[in-house]
Amino acid sequence: MKLDILAIGAHPDDVELGCGATLSKEVSNGKKVGIIDLTRGELGTRGTAETRDAEAFNAAKILGVQSRINMQFADGFFANDKTHQLELIRMIRFYRPELVLCNAIEDRHIDHAKASDLVSDACFLSGLRKIETYYKGNNAQEAWRPKAVYHYIQWRDLIPDIVVDVTNFMAAKMEAVLAYKTQFYDPESKEPETPISSKNFTDSIKYRARNLGRLVGVEHGEGFTVERYPAVDSLFDLK
């Protein structure tokens, strides 16, 4: 399956929180988009791995993505090592995305930076033809390296290198985020409180997008950091 964009997150809900509006916009533009969750979020304080599975499925339908899979790496304990890199290389070569979006380069949750490094390294290694991989017993996969890897912003207010205008796509993002009913603010919930279960956190999703939008002259924005200088054909390509 050939994708235009492959969004990868350490946990189900990372992608929705980090770049859900961007994905919804690109889907509306006719782009083929897929999501990979590295873990099932089984160490999360609220809910279970099974509820996360169901919530992720519903969120994917809301965003309209082509595919969503879970690598079932160990939440909290996966590593950026050969074993995990090869597993991810298989999926990168299967999907052959033009662009990869992945976790923040540094963040409060230790899995986010680990996933950022793992995905970045796997994307590079996926382009080396002497690394042999196979998928579901088929012939050896061809090498494939995405054109760019962009890192979305999560808990920490990192300074973005680029901001995507996501005006008119925040409703889809919020619906996809709130599909994770066990994770976020619910005054009726008897689950323990967590840093992301407060009303302030849910509100912050909107006011961060509005602030990024304000800074670039639009209504809402989502920010990304880049691994190499972004290039434009003309200065007039910049808004």
Image (cartoon, helix red, strand yellow):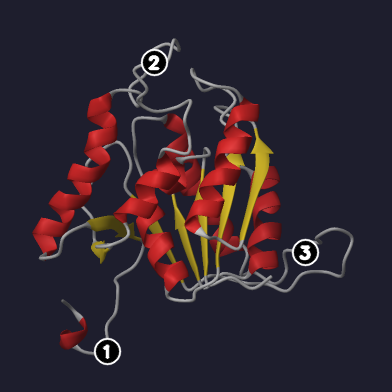
Q: Does residue 213 appear left or right of residue 185 in this picture?
A: left
- Is 117 above or below relative to 227? above
The answer for how far apart the CA atoms under marks 3 and 2 are is 51 Å
Q: Which residue is mark 2?
A: 188
Report which quarter residue 213 is drawn in. bottom left
> Residue at 62% of width from left, 70% of height from top?
96
Density class for disc 2 (Cα within 10 Å; few <14, some 14-19, many ≥20) is few
> Residue at 15% of width from left, 76% of height from top?
239
Q: Which residue is mark 3?
A: 132
Q: Amino acid at mark 2?
A: Glu
The answer for how far apart the CA atoms under marks 3 and 1 are is 36 Å
Q: Amino acid at mark 1?
A: Asp
Q: Give residue 181's position: percent from left, percent from top.
A: 47, 30
Find the residue positioned furthest to the right.
137
Which of label 3 and label 1 is nearer to you? 1
Density class for disc 1 (Cα within 10 Å; few <14, some 14-19, many ≥20) is few
Q: Does residue 239 appear left or right of residue 55 in this picture?
A: left
Q: Which residue is mark 1?
A: 233
First-in-chain label (3 vs 2):
3
Which of label 3 and label 2 is nearer to you? 2
